[in-house]
Image (cartoon, rainbow, N blue to C red):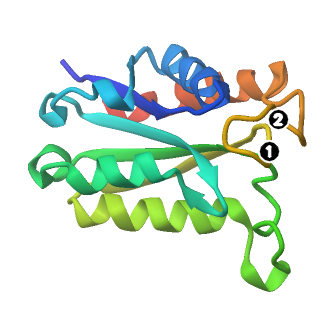
Amino acid sequence: MTKSIVIYNSRGGNTKKVAINIAEGLGAELVQYKKMPDLKDYDLIVLGTWVLAGNPSPHWKKKISKLDPEQLKGKNAVMFICAGGPDNPPLGQGPEAGIIKDLVFELMQKALEDKGAKIAKERLAIPGTFRFFRFGPGTMDKGHPNEEELQQAKKFGESLNKYLK
């Protein structure tokens, strides 16, 4: 029997909403990154995080860096993010810097490949709320993720079932 898991790191709750919908569409176990189980028993691992200044969250990076490579070796890994303006350059930078989702996915992919994971081509970037202050209310992109974006996340999860056959 094949098993899948969706692991998320959420600061304000938006990434969690996206993760819930992906897990529902995939029929996968859902866990917050602090409660990550041993991943050896999973065939498909879906990992998501919020974004800070064009980078995966510091918590996500730290957790992945401490993982035993045996947990991800040869596993199919799928990435998703929830970010304020994922299709924009990082705040204060011009278009030559690239767009946030591409920069973040590149960093996530490197970290996961360094642990032996096989990175799936599918990825999902959903708009979230941009926050100027660490725990302050969302100040830009309010209303995201909206219902349409959450349905997109669910369909994304459904599309990943091909990895479990």
Which amino acid, mark 2? Gly
Residue closest to the far left? 70
Whether residue 131 is visible, yes or no, is yes
Q: Earlier in the sequence, mark 2 or mark 1?
A: 1
Q: Nearer the viewer, residue 54 or 1?
A: 54
Q: Is residue 60 left or right of residue 69?
A: right
Give the quarter of the figure containing the C terminus: top left
The residue positioned 21% from the left and 52% from the top of the image is 66
Is the Cβ of the residue at disc 2 closer than 8 Å to that at disc 1? yes
Q: How many marks?
A: 2
Q: Nearer the viewer, residue 33 or 74?
A: 33
The residue positioned 51% from the left and 68% from the top of the image is 106
**In the rendered image of this protein, does residue 136 appear above or below residue 130?**
above
**In the rendered image of this protein, does residue 57 appear above or below residue 14?**
below
**In the rendered image of this protein, does residue 105 appear above or below residue 32?**
below
**In the rendered image of this protein, does residue 92 appear above or below residue 56?**
below
The residue positioned 49% from the left and 47% from the top of the image is 79
Whether residue 165 is visible, yes or no, is no
Name the spot of residue 119 as percent of width and height, x first. 38, 56
Which amino acid, mark 1? Phe
- What label does residue 34 carry, if any? none
The residue positioned 42% from the left and 62% from the top of the image is 109
Q: Is residue 149 left or right of residue 141?
A: left
Residue receiving disc 2? 138
Name the spot of residue 59 as percent of width and height, x first. 42, 46
- What label does residue 130 carry, if any? 1
- Using a 10 Å C-alpha cutoff, classify the residue at mark 2 as few (fewer than 14 neighbours), some (14 to 19) or many (20 or more): some
Q: Quadrant of residue 92?
A: bottom right
Q: Is residue 43 left or right of residue 135?
A: left
- Using a 10 Å C-alpha cutoff, classify the residue at mark 1 as few (fewer than 14 neighbours), some (14 to 19) or many (20 or more): many
Q: Quadrant of residue 10?
A: top right
Q: Nearer the viewer, residue 91 or 30?
A: 91
